[in-house]
Image (cartoon, rainbow, N blue to C red):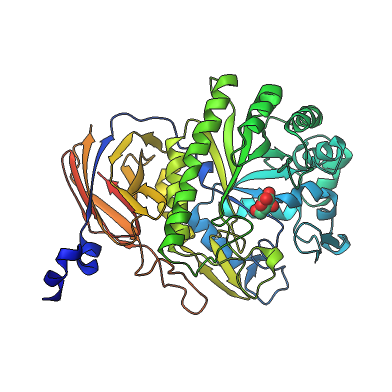
Amino acid sequence: MTLALTIAGGLPTALAAESPVHVSGNLQANAPGPTVNADVFGQFAEDLGHSIYGGVWVGPTSPIPNTDGYRTDVLNALRALKVPVVRWPGGCFADRYDWRDGVGPASQRPITENVSWGGVDDDNSFGTPEYMKFMDMIGARTFVAGNLGSEPPSELAHWVDYMTSTSHSKWAQMRRRDGREQPWRLNYLGVGNELWGCGGNMTADYAADLLRRYVTFVHVDGPQHTDIIGPGANGDDSEWIDTLMKKAGRFMDGIGLHYYTIPGGWKDMQSATDFDESGWIQTLSESLFMDTLVSKDSAIMDKYDPDKRVSLVVDEWGTWFKPEPGSNPSFLYQQNTLRDGMVAALTLNIFVHHADRVRMANIAQMVNVLQAMILTEGDKMVLTPTYYVFKMFIPYQGAKALPLKLETPQYTLGKYNVPSVQGSAVRGKDGHVHMVLVNLDPNRPAQVLMHVEGLSAHQVSGEVLTAPHMNARNTFANPDAIKPAAFGGAQVDGSSLKATLPSKSIVILNVD
Ligand code: AHR
């Protein structure tokens, strides 16, 4: 047979492709660690392209089925995802936004130019009241990104007053005229976005001084507490984190961090869908850099905040590829493949490992922008592999992180070298142990043999997300090309758990 004849020159591809890698692991089910804050699974919806307009908000007179102006299909999909928090209105957009354009009767709101994203007209029909109602409709916490870059502190103070004041100030009265008697819940207030770039091209020292100044004038009224999220660093910029923590640490409850996976960088951006195995491993490898980054920044924060009062908030992360051919390049619309799903799972696992410091993260972005959960076209909607990964992680919301160690071979191609298998585990609020394991190797299954301490397990169930091709994706013509399926490849017997992960797959196991 032809296979046997070729062995002298190495394993024939067909045979090698099927031989599994062997991974061993140890899970301490009896050693619950920090709580995995549900907001780590948060979203970001900027006033950018069709993220809000067309993606979430179509207005009450639209022929697209809607509930008070919000797309009904998108609302339902987000509810099923149990979205914990949504950051809005930017991004770069936030530091140009005048909140007063987005309040009052919709018919009287001005048209403004969205200078940050394509110079398109913005009718401001989705403003603060619509955002707050949206959060209420999907049951998510609020994260408003304030403008520090181009408006004085008084404007931020007035906006917060409008949202939260129980008094009869003119701003609170304005809110009442907008139909809302009670203050809204403002869970998080971002103060400035990317101040090192689109937020004002500032130095870290200057940004720290401004943050102190702006925060001084913000007054959140009533019994509610709002966490202040300081302006984050640009990826691997430890100095930024150091300076902000040193000079302004006590003025924040969280500090931001933005890190995008951009294989090829800005100059040689890659296609979201058209890639080979080298594009696969490069993307996964670059997404794993999040672990290095978070470890580094956490260590810096430990110097100034050993009690970990201040959270590291990864308020922008995800893949950034070339815009979809034919789309407006300023709208940052890209398709989403199994590779994006892998990036999502790897990154969320990293956050779980750093649950003591990373207490919120917001993937960029929720609908129709960058690594989206949902894509829309007219009245059609598709759910992406990234959506399904977030769905698989639902049992992780509010769970306790469990120590998980994996002894895994490396998957290597060219200059890239990544673990074959990566994972995390938690004890869920439901009392069960949940584990997300990712097989990064696109060619070989992985046999995982795990010793589980402190649990005499008798049953395991699970789900798997995979596809025959690395670039599998859901399209408007074929919306169900890739979705999770029941997983029957695991067995458990007392403290011994075995699972065979298909190549290029994400598996969640639920163990009792
Ligand atoms: O998410 C798109 C943009 O990326 C955001 O507006 C900005 O903060 C970042 O550079």
- Residue 293 location (% of width, % of height): 53, 38
Q: Quadrant of residue 109?
A: bottom right
Q: Is residue 273 above or below residue 133?
A: below
Q: In the image, what residue occupies the spot 35% across and 45% down?
A: 423
Question: For the N terminus, which image quadrant?
Answer: bottom left
Side of 323 relative to 349 (left or right): right
Left or right of 200 in this view: 264: left
Q: Position of residue 220 (x, y in %)?
A: 74, 32
Task: Count all numbered tags in the image, as a single digit.
Answer: 0
Residue 435, by quadrant, is top left
Most foreground residue, 125 or 164: 125
Q: Quick one: 46 or 347, which is closer to the camera?
A: 347
- In the image, taking residue 207 as reference, residue 438 lies left or right, namely left
Residue occupying the far front of the picture: 9
Vertical comparison of 281 with 172: above or below:
below
Q: What is the quadrant of the C terminus in the image?
A: top left
Asked whether residue 267 is in view, the answer is yes
Rendered position, 509 above or below 69: above
- Position of residue 456 relative to residue 51, above or below, is above
Q: For the point 56% across and 60% down, which residue is it? A: 372
Image quadrant of residue 277? bottom left
Q: Is residue 57 visible?
A: no
Residue 183 horizontal side relative to residue 15, left or right? right
The residue drawn where x is 63% and y is 56% is: 266
Q: Residue 112: x and y, percent?
A: 85, 60
